[in-house]
Image (cartoon, rainbow, N blue to C red):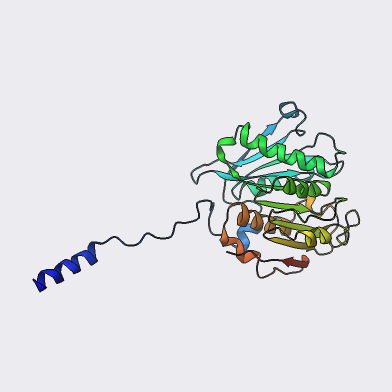
Amino acid sequence: MKVLALFTAVTLAVTAPAAPAQAANPYERGPAPTNASIEASRGSFAIAQVTVARSAVSGRFGGGTIYYPTSTAEGTFGAVAISPGFTASQSSVAWLGPRLASQGFVVITIDTNNTLDQPDSRGTQLLAALDYLTGQSSVRTRIDATRLGVMGHSMGGGGSLSASRTRPALQAAIPLTPWHTTKSWTTDRVPTMIIGAENDTVAPVSSHSEPFYTSLTVAPEKAYLELNNAGHSAPTATNVTVAKYSISWLKRFIDNDTRYDQFLCPAPSGSAIQEYRATCPHS
């Protein structure tokens, strides 16, 4: 009997199933990142684009361009809407479309209803663009509507702050050299990276980016990156630093991808960065 009992115990030990491994992050998209991969002009995803006619979204925003990964083999993607600044068209932020989409996002760069629209109006239009993406666009089935973010340049950056305050369910915001007459964003609950420019004379960091960042007292995570020796228009042309840390922020908070923590904390430095402040993402 003792031999039988011992045999039974050994058999159970051998045949009992192993404890299930911890589930991988279901939102993770693309290979493990490296400095080279997030500095590259394109990521690992092949992309396509489609034009959104102004007439198709009349009154909501001024039309735009959608950039999206062509393969859905890894599942759905998070989405980002990007607004240009005062007097500008989507062409001023167009470089970000393929750059971000090829890293595994659906991206819409928008024209505004009027090039003179103020920041809060741009915020409303960013949200309308996200709603169009997830509800009506030809790529809506490729998007996870719970994983959305906003970006914008200048007044579009101010618009991304406004959109975040209006819709706290957003997963990430990146105002680029933002401009807004409102300086306090104490009710904004969206993880936000503000990118300012040292030599910005249109939206000086001392009266825009820095007070915006400081006021984000309830945002679960926040960061402030100041571009060294750069002006207000720095984010409107291909900029490796803007791209690298925008990708890292969007991946970390839209995709919950902690593989990108390494680029955000400890604080990045280098000749392109004048200053960096952050709360450091918590895994």
**The N terminus lies in which quarter of the figure?**
bottom left
Q: Quick one: 74 or 121, which is closer to the camera?
A: 121
Q: Position of residue 256 (x, y in %)?
A: 57, 55
Whether 110 is drawn above or below 190: the answer is above
Q: Nearer the viewer, residue 95 or 220?
A: 220
The image shows residue 79, relative to residue 55, as above or below, that is below
Give residue 219's quadrant in the image. Answer: bottom right
> For residue 244, what is the image quadrant?
bottom right
Instruction: Give residue 51's position: percent from left, percent from top.
Output: 69, 33
Residue at the farthest bottom position:
2
**Most distant residue in the right direction:** 201
**Residue displayed at 57% across by 57% down:** 257
Question: Is residue 40 in view?
Answer: no
Residue 110 left/right relative to 35 = right
- In the picture, the quarter occupied by the C terminus is bottom right
Image quadrant of residue 90?
top right
Check the image and name the residue furthest to the left. Answer: 1
Residue 194: where, in percent of width, then height?
76, 57
Up the image or down, 267 lies above or below 173; here it is: below
Where is residue 176 shown, x and y percent of the image? 78, 53
Which residue is depicted at the point 76% across and 62% down? 225
Query: Does residue 52 appear in this view?
Result: yes
In the picture, measured across the screen, residue 94 lies left or right of residue 211, that is left
Q: Nearer the viewer, residue 64 or 16?
A: 16
